[in-house]
């Protein structure tokens, strides 16, 4: 089943965030597809940031492996230090029953 990595946050250090973007390719491993990269998200409920990223993976296992990989873990701290009000989720997609 398809799975998605959804991240949402506010960027407080644009220079560090650009550095993260240049080095964050490992999150795209495992057949990933970038679906959303929006720097002007409109929060309607609860807390949320202006930056939203949605990455699609063929399976939950592929999403978890990409996030937990040593290569991505080596750079994720840059994003965490460059942002506030953040969260990242891995969620399963939905398949309509036949």
Image: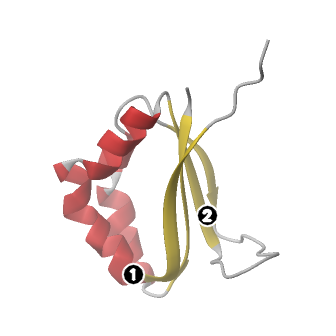
Q: Where 14 sits versus 23, above or below?
A: below
Q: Could you classify mark 2 by the number of other residues whose Cα lies within 10 Å: few (under 14), some (14-19), or many (20 or more)?
A: many
Q: Residue at x 51, y 70 (%)?
A: 87
Residue 47 image point, x, y percent: 67, 82
For the C terminus, the image quarter is top right
Which residue matches tag 2?
52
Q: Out of 37 and 61, give the one closest to the viewer.
A: 61
Q: Residue at x 77, y 23 (%)?
A: 96
For the N terminus, the image quarter is top right
Q: Where 80 sits versus 70, above or below?
A: below
Q: Out of 87 and 98, give the one closest to the viewer.
A: 98
**Tag of residue 82:** 1
Residue 37 image point, x, y percent: 60, 56
The alpha-carbon separation of the residues under discs 1 and 2 comes to: 14 Å
Q: Where 73 sits versus 32, above or below?
A: below
Q: Residue at x 25, y 63 (%)?
A: 75
Q: Out of 20 and 48, give the one closest to the viewer.
A: 48
**Tag of residue 23:** none
Identify the element where label 2 is drawn. strand
Q: Could you classify mark 1 by the number of other residues whose Cα lies within 10 Å: few (under 14), some (14-19), or many (20 or more)?
A: many
- Residue at the front extreme, as displayed: 97
Q: Out of 95 and 43, give the one closest to the viewer.
A: 95
> How is the rendered protein coloured?
secondary structure
Residue 78 image point, x, y percent: 30, 73
Identify the element where label 1 is drawn. helix
Q: Residue at x 39, y 81 (%)?
A: 82
Disc on the earlier residue, 1 or 2:
2
Residue 57 image point, x, y percent: 49, 34
Count of numbered circles on the image: 2
Is there a contact, CB below 8 Å, between mark 1 and mark 2?
no
Give the side of residue 77 with respect to residue 54, left or right: left
Give the side of residue 34 with respect to residue 96, left or right: left
């Amino acid at each position: 089943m398809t799975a998605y990595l959804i991240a949402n946050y506010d960027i407080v250090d644009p220079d560090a965030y650009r550095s993260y973007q240049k080095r964050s390719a490992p999150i795209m491993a495992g057949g990933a597809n970038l679906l959303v990269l929006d720097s002007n998200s409109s929060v309607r409920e609860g807390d949320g940031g202006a930056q939203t990223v949605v990455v699609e993976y063929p399976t939950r296992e592929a999403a978890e492996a990409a996030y937990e990989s040593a290569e991505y873990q080596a750079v994720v701290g840059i994003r965490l230090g460059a942002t506030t009000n953040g969260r990242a989720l891995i969620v399963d997609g939905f398949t309509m029953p036949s």
